[in-house]
Image: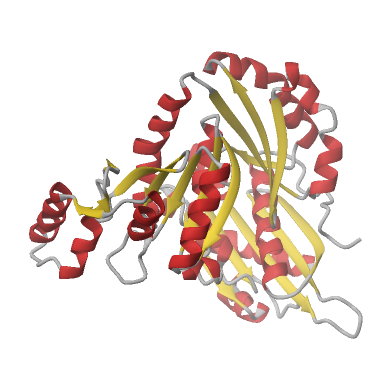
């Protein structure tokens, strides 16, 4: 079954809106054992849409069209689909009634142009949308089956998961189970990761596993994808490859699957019934922000956070605890961490200081990062020079600080050279 995903909209074509819908659809199809062969983006133009529909109908068995089902003049999917199929548009009375009821339940009158959303190509199969006013539909154009979905992400996701994937599974006629095992790492670049995992694909019999990498700085995601006839056989097939990745990547693995680095840290704080105070310089408070956007118990774990671009302002926050005037250094970070933990009576204190090195001539910019952790009789420091300036170095510094604290909590070596730091 050859599948094409066809996304519509000028905002997508021009880059004003990031096309996360394509990513979600492609991922869900792959996870359910389907192969996506083409991805196309088309603007809100009748001629371009007509050409894209006809081309897709000649090369794909299934085409998923996303967007263009709204009430405005630039929403053209129904109209162009009907023209491509050689039929007219007809009013879907039940959907019109549903839309009118949706507006009435909210004390509003449905605008007249919303009736356009109930106009479907004659003979099209209706596809329900339980959370919006844009219904989906399916129609055959040439030899391909087209499925039309709304552009609103939450509406599209419900329709893909609950309506379209079951239809495709039924059309396929047999079950395929797919599992994607994901490892999130920090400190290893793609080239090194590829070398470290040399031969891992051979650990799964019959070449049934695909190894892949997705870099989104500062993290690297490593994916093991396996297809099989049952979920039980998938787990057995993947086991040796999973074990190999954990062994070869340790302790660079931050977390696995849907876990996050910040979630891992907060979960460990909760498990230990411990608390944390934080100081951040030049990070825009992102360490604190990430930790405060995890579980419902996170606020009980964070005692205090101090954020400033001035190291002396950080000193002033704990000034009565013996910290003199300081400059950015490992010693300063250690002193601040000790004073912060004492002042706030936290189990741990984490300090990250940054000193920016501006670009000069042919020299690239960089940032010196000083990290310190203090915790009840034990303290550690970590220095790194990270390449890049501004947002790039800030992302690296935040990730490095959080990874150091994760390692400290889990009693792993805090200092370990990473691929991104300058030697």
**Position of residue 266 measured from the top left corner of the image (x, y, whole percent):** 52, 46
Left or right for 51, reference 72: right
Image quarter of residue 141: top left
Q: Is residue 252 visible?
A: yes
Residue at image position (38%, 59%) is: 80
**Position of residue 90 measured from the top left corner of the image (x, y, whole percent):** 21, 53
Camera-side residue of 67 and 101: 67
Way the structure is coloured: secondary structure
Q: Residue furthest bottom?
A: 361
Image quarter of residue 33: top right
**Position of residue 82 measured from the top left corner of the image (x, y, whole percent):** 34, 54
Residue at image position (47%, 66%) is: 47
In the rendered image of this protein, does residue 117 appear above or below residue 262?
below
Left or right for 78, reference 389: left
Name the image quarter holding the N terminus: top right
Camera-side residue of 47 and 116: 47
């Amino acid at each position: 079954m050859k599948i094409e995903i066809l996304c519509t909209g000028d905002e997508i074509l021009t880059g004003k809106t990031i096309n996360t819908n394509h990513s979600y659809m492609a991922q869900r199809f792959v996870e359910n054992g389907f192969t996506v062969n083409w991805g196309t983006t088309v603007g809100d133009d009748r001629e371009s849409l007509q050409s894209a529909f006809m081309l897709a109908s000649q090369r794909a068995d299934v085409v998923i069209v996303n967007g263009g089902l709204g009430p405005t003049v630039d929403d053209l999917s129904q109209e162009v689909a009907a023209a491509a199929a050689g039929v007219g548009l007809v009013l879907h009375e039940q959907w019109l009634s549903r839309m009118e009821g949706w507006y009435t339940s909210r004390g509003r009158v449905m605008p007249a142009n919303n009736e356009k959303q109930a106009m479907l190509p004659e003979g099209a199969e209706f596809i329900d949308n339980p959370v919006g006013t844009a219904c989906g539909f399916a129609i055959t154009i040439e030899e391909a089956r087209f499925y039309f979905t709304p552009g609103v992400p939450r509406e599209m996701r419900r329709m893909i998961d609950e309506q379209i994937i079951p239809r495709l599974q039924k059309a396929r006629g047999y079950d395929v189970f797919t599992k994607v095992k994901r490892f999130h790492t920090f400190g290893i670049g793609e080239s090194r990761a590829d070398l470290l995992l040399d031969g891992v694909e051979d650990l799964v019999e019959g070449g049934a596993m695909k190894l892949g990498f997705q870099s989104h700085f500062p993290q690297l995601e490593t994916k093991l994808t396996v297809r099989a006839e049952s979920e039980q056989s998938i787990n057995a097939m993947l086991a040796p490859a999973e074990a190999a990745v954990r062994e070869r990547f340790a302790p660079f693995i931050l977390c696995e699957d849907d876990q996050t680095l910040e979630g891992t840290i907060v979960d460990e704080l909760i498990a230990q019934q411990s608390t944390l105070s934080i100081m951040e310089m030049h990070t825009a408070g992102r360490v604190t922000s990430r930790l405060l956007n995890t579980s419902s118990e996170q606020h009980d774990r964070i005692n205090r956070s101090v954020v400033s671009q001035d190291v002396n302002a950080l000193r002033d926050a704990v000034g009565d605890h013996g910290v003199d005037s300081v400059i950015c250094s490992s010693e300063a970070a250690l002193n601040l961490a000790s004073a912060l933990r004492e002042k706030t009576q936290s189990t741990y204190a984490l300090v990250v200081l940054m000193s920016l090195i501006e670009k000069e001539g042919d020299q690239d910019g960089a940032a010196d990062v000083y990290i310190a952790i203090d915790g009840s009789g034990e303290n550690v420091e970590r220095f790194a020079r990270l390449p890049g300036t501004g947002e790039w170095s800030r992302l690296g510094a935040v990730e490095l600080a959080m990874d150091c604290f994760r390692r400290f909590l889990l009693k792993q070596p805090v200092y370990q050279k990473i691929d991104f730091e300058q030697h």
